[in-house]
Image: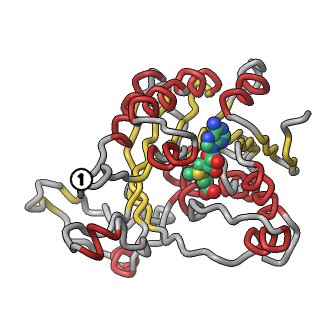
Amino acid sequence: MDSVCYKTKRGMMYLGDCEQIIRKYISSDSKRRVDLIFTSPPFPLNRAKRYGNMTGEEYLEWFSGLAPLFSEILAEDGSVVIEIGNAWEKGVPVHSTLPIEALLKFKERGNLYLCQEFIHYNPSALPAPIEWVNKRRVRVKDSFTRLWWMAKTPNPRADNRQVLEHYSERMQKLIERKSYNAGRRPSEHVIGDNSFMVDNGGAIPGNVIIAANTASKGKYFAYCKEKGLDIHPARMPREVPEFFIRFLTKENGLVLDPFAGSNITGAIAEQLNRNWIGIEINEVYASGSKGRFTETND
Ligand SMILES: C[S@@+](CC[C@H](N)C(=O)[O-])C[C@H]1O[C@@H](n2cnc3c(N)ncnc32)[C@H](O)[C@@H]1O
């Protein structure tokens, strides 16, 4: 197959336009249903720079036009998680509403439910846009991206026991105590006698994923350097795909990233014993992503 860039034990990376590849290899195969589409599409402004002068309206049309196709290849209890960062209007310190409009239109055209909104907070985000944040000091750093978890039903497969966090020290102490100050709280919550005394294996996380985007070494970087390939400029930290893959899929499930970039999604899926498909239109990025699967001590 000419468009396969590489294969691994559990996955396949395609080189090409995601719509064409999905139509050719996935939607035509009715037995191949995807449990999770997890992706970070090109942001509105990037796309304008790199793919000609696509205006906001064109971007909306293009992006939301993919929704029916994504919905078609999704398992009935599957999920779509789309990450989009913030964008600014040109020349003024004003946020663009395009990312939110794009998500809304995608949801509508895919006939999807918004199961929950998430935020990825990057504590190490650089000050940007420099003009408004550093020079004029009239805005603060943009330090989060928005993720919409959508599905064809209000009850897609999900299990928060797969994403439990370590208990805080305070919580650990509560669990170890034999008695608890039960009763009604000022917030109107009623706390039962044993509410906090059961060890459930970890704390249920909130919908803010805190992960710094600072990784700059490891086998992906070494591989790209050795082959003289550009490092992908918009890599996601591993914690983000890892959270959703664990939360929304089971082992041997199928995860698709149609805008795979450096293919962190595929790499994490492989580590978690899920099957995966990645699609990337840029040959340099697709080739470089192979470095995530090399056998090194990393
Ligand atoms: C925001 S990046 C994804 C980064 C990725 N999550 C990572 O952590 O490396 C979006 C990617 O989509 C790719 N892309 C843009 N249009 C595409 C298309 N029509 N089909 C497939 N890939 C596309 C771009 O080349 C870019 O690498």
Height in image: 81 above or below 123? above
Height in image: 1 above or below 191? above
Question: Which residue is at the front of the view, 39 or 208?
Answer: 39
Q: Could you tell me which secondary element the residue under label 1 belongs to?
A: loop
| Quadrant containing the C terminus in the rendered view | bottom right
Question: Which residue is at the front of the view, 57 or 111?
Answer: 57
Q: Position of residue 62 (x, y in %)?
A: 51, 29
The answer to whether residue 153 is visible is yes
Q: Residue at x 43, y 42 (%)?
A: 148
Q: Residue at x 42, y 35 (%)?
A: 55
Q: Residue at x 48, y 47 (%)?
A: 43
Q: Which residue is mark 1?
A: 94
Give the residue type at disc 1: Val
Spot the residue most to the right.
Answer: 1
Image check: 220 left or right of 9?
Answer: left
Q: Position of residue 10 (x, y in %)?
A: 82, 47
Question: Which residue is at the front of the view, 56 or 179?
Answer: 56
Crowd rating for badge 1 (residues with CA inside 10 Å; few <14, some 14–19, many 20+): few
Counting the numbered discs, the total is: 1
Image check: 247 left or right of 94?
Answer: right
The answer to whether residue 258 is visible is no
